[in-house]
Image: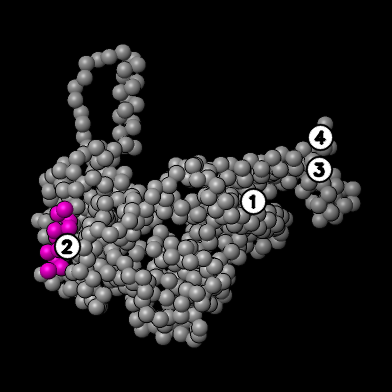
């Protein structure tokens, strides 16, 4: 099997043009600069026949998936980090082979894979466990199904009485974002749904006791339960569904050929062979043969601006998480940063070197890495199981403390040295001089930088969604994926962020005026 990695297709369109005036030349250069941003627009304007003609002419079927999806869909086999395998990798190769093409894998983030498909240019189809649901059919065209699955509840082996959704009211249940599992929990109500971005970490959190259950698709459950005596299935699978290949709306020629290839692979036993290779073939796959199009409803498209009464409260509730995580994280950063600055400037040599090492390490490593280390690493290596909220506050606070330490150091060094020397000459102890003379002035000097970091943390707090904390940006992403309205929801989300940041800015200005009362 040969899998190629390709990037966005390039289109060259150069033609001789007669010289024009300065305005025309400026316009031409502007269009040239805009080409990289709008290179994919042409994909929207091709007809269905042109789409298939372009694919067949290239001889390559570019399919998108997310390599973080994990087994059994797509993953790096042990000992071969440069290779990709999985039943969807084999399926893509089989479909491409049936069409006389070569498969070409294109990496794309799962959460935005369908919007990326509609933008065009980077890939032709999506083969990534896209569920045959009204929500997805409202966004893209879906092929006939290639895999049948069900919903599976998973709990710890020693858990009792948690074998149904009704029994999980008030419980913490992990789900994958942008899936039927999440929508099912949301419609059921009364369940504390924790949204994850991968198929692995919610099982780890279930083992460690951070979750009470996981709701996921049967292939994911099967792989993660294999050889794991800490977890068990909670009842049989339910709510059967299908996976399908996604293509851009209107590309009927390409879709028809994909449908024909899947039909042929099902009839000649190729699908069964692939699924048995990954221990996925079961009685439920008989539904593939019996499946017939029709009888499916298409979800209505939503306008968030018209339905602001529904979506604005949802976003505001998520913004509460953003506010308390940011405020708590900044409080920790301010206190710890001030301590680091003082130790770096006035502490004994070992303490000074330790403070410098802390600042350089936390400034020189990504915040995302620090969050993973604090939330997952400490639990795995030391058994320290922090809640998602507490881990988020700690990670943001420790990271920003390094920046605040440098802000305070600059403020302290901005105060004339003569003031400290005069205080010491008058008999004041260094600690008292720092507290009464130096620090009030240094804090006033540092306040604009600290305020800027506080506002920046409102936006940086969105990264905590990787540990299943649904803050404002993650809520926007979830709702935009469901409704397909990125603009309306984006405007509301941006407005909420602006309101939070502007309020913080006004508070900082008031504090500056208060601290500046003794200025002449």
Q: Nearer the viewer, mark 2 or mark 3?
A: 2
Q: Position of residue 269 (x, y in %)?
A: 13, 72
Mark 4 or mark 1: which comes first in sequence? 1
* Residue corresponding to mark 4: 519
Mark 2 or mark 3: which comes first in sequence? 2
Q: Nearer the viewer, mark 1 or mark 3?
A: 1
Query: Which region shows up in magenta?
Result: 256-267
Q: Nearer the viewer, mark 2 or mark 4?
A: 2
Q: Position of residue 244 (x, y in %)?
A: 26, 60
Q: Position of residue 250 (x, y in %)?
A: 23, 45
Q: Which mark is residue 255?
A: none
Helix, strand or loop for disc 4: loop
Residue at x-position 31% and y-position 44%: 119
Helix, strand or loop for disc 1: helix
Can residue 259 be found in the magenta stretch?
A: yes
Main secondary structure along the magenta-highlighted residues: helix
Q: Residues within 10 Å of mark 2 (few under 14, many from 20)?
A: many
Mark 4 or mark 3: which comes first in sequence? 3
Mark 1 or mark 3: which comes first in sequence? 1
Mark 1 or mark 2: which comes first in sequence? 2
What is the CA distance from the residue labelled 1 to the residue labelled 2? 58 Å
* Residue corresponding to mark 3: 419
Q: Which mark is residue 404?
A: 1
Residue at x-position 50% and y-position 59%: 465
Residue at x-position 41% and y-position 52%: 481
Q: Is residue 348 left or right of residue 364?
A: right
Q: Which mark is residue 262?
A: 2
Q: Nearer the viewer, mark 4 or mark 3?
A: 4
Helix, strand or loop for disc 2: helix
């Amino acid at each position: 099997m040969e899998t190629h990695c390709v990037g966005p297709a390039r289109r060259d369109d150069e033609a001789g043009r007669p010289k024009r005036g300065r305005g025309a030349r400026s316009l031409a250069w502007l269009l040239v600069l805009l080409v990289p941003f709008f290179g994919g627009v042409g994909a929207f304007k091709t007809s269905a026949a042109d789409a298939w003609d372009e694919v067949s002419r290239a001889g390559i079927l570019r399919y998108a998936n997310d390599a973080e999806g994990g087994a059994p869909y797509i993953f790096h086999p042990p000992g071969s980090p440069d290779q990709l395998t999985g039943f969807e990798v084999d399926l893509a190769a089989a479909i491409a082979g049936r069409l006389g093409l070569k498969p070409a894998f294109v990496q794309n983030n799962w959460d935005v894979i369908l919007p990326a498909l509609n933008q065009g240019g980077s890939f032709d189809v999506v083969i990534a466990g896209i569920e045959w649901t009204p929500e997805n059919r409202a966004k893209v065209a879906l092929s006939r199904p290639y895999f049948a699955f069900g919903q599976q509840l998973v709990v710890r082996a020693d858990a009792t009485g948690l074998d149904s959704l009704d029994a999980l009211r008030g419980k913490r249940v992990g789900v994958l974002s942008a899936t039927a599992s999440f929508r099912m929990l949301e419609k059921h109500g009364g369940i504390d749904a924790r949204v994850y971005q991968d198929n692995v970490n919610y099982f780890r959190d279930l083992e460690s006791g951070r979750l009470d259950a996981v709701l996921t698709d049967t292939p994911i459950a099967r792989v993660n339960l294999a050889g794991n005596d800490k977890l068990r299935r909670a009842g049989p699978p339910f709510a059967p569904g299908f996976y399908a290949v996604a293509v851009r709306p209107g590309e009927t020629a390409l879709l028809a050929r994909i449908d024909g290839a899947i039909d042929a692979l099902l009839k000649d036993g190729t699908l069964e062979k692939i699924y048995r290779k990954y221990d996925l073939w079961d009685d439920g796959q008989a539904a593939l043969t019996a499946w017939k199009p029709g009888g499916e409803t298409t979800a209505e498209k939503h306008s968030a601006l018209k339905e602001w009464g529904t979506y604005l409260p949802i976003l505001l509730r998520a913004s509460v998480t953003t506010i308390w995580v940011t405020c708590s994280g900044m409080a920790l950063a301010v206190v710890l940063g001030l301590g680091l600055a003082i130790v770096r400037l006035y502490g004994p040599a070992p303490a000074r070197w330790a403070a410098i090492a802390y600042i350089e390490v936390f400034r020189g490593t990504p915040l995302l890495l620090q969050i993973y280390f604090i939330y997952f690493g400490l639990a795995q290596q030391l058994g320290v199981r922090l809640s998602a909220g507490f881990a988020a506050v700690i990670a943001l606070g420790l990271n920003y403390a390094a920046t605040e330490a440098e802000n305070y150091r600059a403020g302290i060094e901005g105060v004339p040295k003569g003031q400290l020397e005069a205080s010491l000459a008058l008999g004041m102890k260094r600690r008292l001089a720092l507290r009464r003379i130096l620090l009030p002035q240094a804090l006033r000097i540092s306040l604009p930088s600290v305020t800027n970091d506080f506002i920046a943390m409102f936006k940086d707090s969105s990264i905590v969604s990787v540990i299943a904390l649904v803050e404002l940006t993650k809520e926007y992403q979830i709702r935009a994926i469901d409704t397909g309205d990125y603009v309306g929801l984006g405007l509301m989300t941006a407005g909420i962020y602006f309101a939070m940041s502007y309020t913080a800015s006004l508070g900082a200005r008031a504090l500056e005026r208060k601290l500046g009362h003794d200025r002449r």
